Image (cartoon, rainbow, N blue to C red):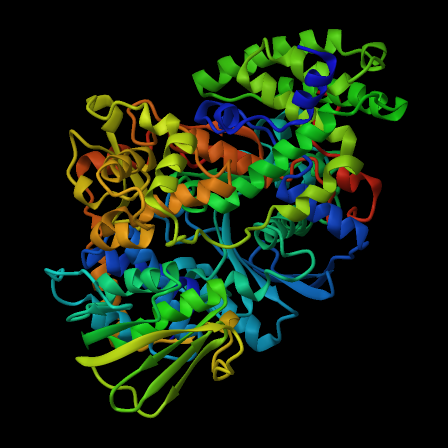
Amino acid sequence: MRRSLNEIEVALRKAAVGAGLPFGQAEDIGEAGAWLCAHGHDGIGACLAALGGSRPEAAAAIRLDGTSTVPEARVAWTGPSALDLLLADEELAEIAFTGIDAPLLLAGCAGVAAAAGGTCFDLRFPTGCTVSIGPGGLAVSGPLPPAGADAVLTRRGHAGSRPRTPQTSPAEGAEVGEAAWVEVLALAALTYVPASEASRATGAGAGDIDND
Amino acid sequence: MTAAAHRDDRAAPRPPDEVMRLARMGAFFPTRLSFMRTLLRRLSAERAVVHRAVWEIDDAGFGRAVYSVPLGGHTYSLVAFSTPLAPEDRTDRVIAEAWDTSYVLYDGVPAPGDLDRLQANAPRQEAGRFSATDLVLCRANRSVRLFEHVADCLSRGVQPPADVINATGYLMRTTAVYGNGKFGIADRARIETRPGLSGPFAAEMLAVWLVRGFTIDLVEHIARSRAPDSFVPLDRALKRHLGIGNATGLGMAPFLVSHPILLDRWMTARETALARVRAVPHASPEARDKAEELIARVRRHLDQWRVADARQSRRIEVLRREVADLAALATRDWLAGPFPWDRLVAASMRHSLECQELVVSLVLEPNGALVDDLADTMASAGRPRLRPEMPVAALTDLVDSRFAWALGIDFEDREATDRFWYVSEEKLEPRLGSRHQEPGADKEMPLDIARQVQALRRELAAAPASQTVAEFLLARPAHRHAVRRVQTAADHPYAEIRDNLIAADCLPIDMLRCKLSFFGAAKFDPKSDRWTRITMFQGAPLLDEIATPLADDWWLSALEGL
């Protein structure tokens, strides 16, 4: 079914909170998922791949000779911060990730950063696959490796690349599979508070007639 | 203070510490920068003609209709459905599953197939699905007090009494107006660069204005069908006094918090307009005439603004007296003196917040040429972005300078954390709970901005001053939201409501009134501290009057002869 991008972003943000992410990171993950959908990619699947499991024990990137490394990369937890590091330090040329749980979502996080700041990125995998990310979208050369792959994210200056034309107009929304959507909504539902007698009586400020 | 310093001060916008307080925001009135006004000015400037392309309504008033209007080079159509509704099913609450009428604002002119698709979905509202050509989805219920009364009067050949029209002020009341992608309708991106619809909530306001026209056509149609020989059309002045009602609750309240840049744009435009007007050294004779006329109109409006809510009734009573004082002071001769608008604003400062904010709206009104361009600055300029390169020392300075109001709150006091905002599983709508009495605070919505910033400030004190925000957040991801808000406030001084939104004494109704005033709503009629009735487009031009001078002269309208 076609979902609007706003529906997608809001649902993914809630799902991320439901999965245990702090709200500020959930905002980024929701935006990254919607950005992927807007550009013809499976942003829903990418987010779901990243939202399973528990919070990683060590979410720190390790600075080493001009390169930072993110081990056992849980993108929902470390993706936004890795992008922050790359953008904050001009001397930092690249960040290496190992065991990435959701490679496409990492590209989505970079895509949001690219769209916001005009920066371009490359995400290179040992298989030879490279994802080129710019403000207008992303282009993938070769099959995108599955979860567990290693990759290096490189900042590549400002826009000038020629990313693939988006398959879906941002104004049109995106097609979303029902099974994945149900999974997103189930995570989002973890943020809802069940009704109680008190909430029904006062939560919305009822107490006066509403039909005259 | 020197004269020069006084002039400088007069020309500066009011500081956020003064403006961004809930009590003041909850006293706002619509202005000429409000979105309804902006939209109708545009339609009027384009001399738009509304065309009723479809009218398939039966004698009982059920069926469908389409109204099309050109705007900014595009054509938009309100598709309206009127359906039978049992009295026991008529409610403004979210639990409703059926309504008297339902609507879609369609991008273009709908083909018969589109009409059939919408007819299958629009009456179901949240349970339906919509397409990217559907810009706005809404519904409205008849006013039990007024709709049938007006239909009955007109069918008998008599006009309904003016006081009865004024007592309600609308034939129908909307209970939700959805935009921006809800239930599959178009994302705002589809229209955000279009002339006429690029402003905030412009599509929603267009839909509601057209709905108002439909409600008037519908009541006349029903009355005519009942008794064609005795039917008389509704008096035009009475029609104009009929707006569209709306019941607004907590669903709207978090919006101002979750859209800090947009809030800043709205407030900046309003405060810049005020500063410009206060700096006017002399008012033209025409402006003085207009001010005198407006003050008289305001007094009639206040006389006609009657509500059951005890708190608001007291405020209106006070306001009537205060405006009477100002009316006696602000004569044409008094306004002929130097800096008349600034002196009027200054004179209001000894009165209530409602009076002060009423005067803000009042002084903008005769000065459209000076302020109307600001309406073009009120759309959002993007979303909050993190600045990861910022050093912790600079972030700390920002917290201390922009959030001093938050740092001073004692969150050890139970009253300071008495409330929590949450989304109800049952209704999927924001609600407000009592933290110390109800479960659910572990799923709290992040509207506790002051508390989050305090927690951030504590962590910043322990971090190296030269560390970047990127490094800081890598170890402390829980503060990402607060950091983003603090950095946003650096360039957006009016981005934050400077009050504790989880305090026991927080009144959500103040947030509602602020937002609704920017829409252009009036006749605020609180039903509790969490929901309110309002009237939209009361006094506004009718569908066939949009190209007349009346189109931009309906601020705080009043019905003559009451």
Q: Which quadrant holds the N terminus of chain B?
A: top right
The residue nearer to you, when weighing B462 against B41, is B462
Q: Residue furthest right?
A: B285
Q: Is residue B101 visible?
A: no
State whether residue A193 is above or below residue B333.
Answer: below
State whether residue B229 is above or below residue B82.
Answer: above
Q: Is residue B505 visible?
A: yes
State the residue at coordinates (56%, 43%).
Answer: B265
The residue nearer to you, when weighing A78 against A17, is A78
State the residue at coordinates (83%, 44%).
Answer: B548
Residue B396 in the image, given as x and y percentages of width and height: 35, 37
State the residue at coordinates (69%, 45%).
Answer: B38
State whether residue B545 is above or below residue B458.
Answer: below
**Left or right of B530: which side holds B373?**
right
Residue B441 in the image, given as x and y percentages of width and height: 19, 39
Q: Residue furthest front?
A: A65
State whether residue A78 is above or below residue B94.
Answer: below
The residue nearer to you, when weighing B295 against B246, is B295
**Left or right of B23: which side holds B8?**
right
Residue B56 in the image, given as x and y percentages of width and height: 63, 64
Residue B99 in the image, given as x and y percentages of width and height: 45, 51
The residue nearer to you, when weighing A27 against B387, is B387
Q: How many marks?
A: 0
Q: Which quadrant holds the C terminus of chain B?
A: top right
